[in-house]
Image: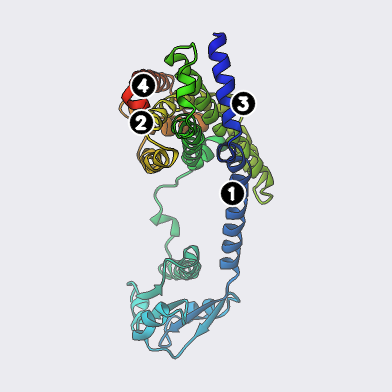
Amino acid sequence: MSTFVTIFRKEFTDTIRDRRTLFMMIVFPLLLVPALMIVVTNIQMSSMKKAEEKVLRIALVSRANAPGLVAALTGRSDLRIITGIPADSMEVLIARDSIDAAVVIAPDFDAAVAGMTSGTIKLFYKSSDDFDMVKRRLSGVIGSYEKQLVAGRFAKLKIDAGIVNPVKIEEHDVASMKERIGKSVGGMVPYLFVIFCFMGSMYPAIDLAAGEKERGTMETLLTAPVSRFQILLGKFAVVVLTGLLSAAVSIFGILLAVRQISKIPPEVLSAVMAILDGQTVLLVLSLLFPLTVFFAAFLLSVSVFAKSYKEAQSMISPLMIVVILPVMIGLFPGVALDPVTAVIPVLNVSLATKEIIAGTIKTGLLLEVYASLFLLAGLSLFGCARWFEREETIFRGV
């Protein structure tokens, strides 16, 4: 045990001296993540506010029809009504950003409404602009006008408007604020955790194997009166520790970011803080531990095989896509934790983390995730140990 501790201390000291490792393990998750979250949130809120306050340029073709709707549109201060534009030019003008939208009322609109049938109103807009604010604002005006016409019809026919609503729905959402927020943002949290686990493990793994081979210190270490497995275990423990530290620091960085965003409603802030409580964080880290063991063993195997630091980096960097893909699948709607997805590496961590954050995790599925992860971690460590014992692997290219 003392030999392992000595090797671990030596390797950990060498690791924290590396600036790249310290940056990816501490600086990036602790400073850049909160900064990015705050900047992105503020930009999004500012853009939404700007879109809500924007005065829209609306082309209107009424042909003296729907005077109530025309009055409603012209009476709004957030709309600038433009008339005299041909109806067949609307799409081109919107595509050129000459106008924001167009409302074209059919020539027979008043006649159709008077005859108790449906009148046609064409709405032209570009859905990709300003959070779809144009459509929502105009749809609100047209919807209010439609309700006035319907009320007028019922009054004319002397019929109670409630006759068309035979069912009255009273909605009662039993999901707590924590559960609703957890389901909505829970998919992004494991995305960050898994990425930081991988990145926090990547640079130490490269430096402790390929880096030592490049510096020529691997041979000196192997001549020490200790077994290769003890040497591997010391390096392996450092890589696992840095990966977990990176994930833990990212959690702290998220907490800092949430506290710095002043525009979050108090009830939402309290729910977010409840999501990131001690029990939740410990459960998430317990899921990340076997996953980090798998990452560490795999990354060390690749690093031992590589001839140099640069070759190891070029071999490992593309694997980031392989790690991100299952996490992204966990963000898709309809993909949930079940007996099948609970055994798929990385994806099971993503889905289980989302369920833990929402407070809806099932014990049986959680145990299945643990079992699959620890089995995978054990197999990867066994494979890495066998790989490290091979002379042609360690001294490849030397």
Q: Residue furthest bottom?
A: 84
Disc 3 marks which residue?
278
The amino acid type of the residue labelled 3 equals Gly
Q: Earlier in the sequence, mark 4 or mark 1?
A: 1
Q: Residues within 10 Å of mark 3 (few under 14, many from 20)?
A: few
Q: Earlier in the sequence, mark 3 or mark 2?
A: 3
Q: Position of residue 225 (x, y in %)?
A: 49, 11
Q: Earlier in the sequence, mark 4 or mark 2?
A: 2
Residue 24, above or below 93: above
Q: Is residue 359 left or right of residue 335?
A: right
Task: Specify whether residue 330 is in view.
Answer: no
Q: Earlier in the sequence, mark 3 or mark 4?
A: 3
Q: Which mark is residue 305?
A: 2
- Which of labels 3 and 2 is toward the front? 2
Which element type, helix, strand or loop, lies under badge 2?
helix
- Which of labels 3 and 4 is toward the front? 4
Disc 4 marks which residue?
372
Q: Residues within 10 Å of mark 1 (few under 14, many from 20)?
A: some
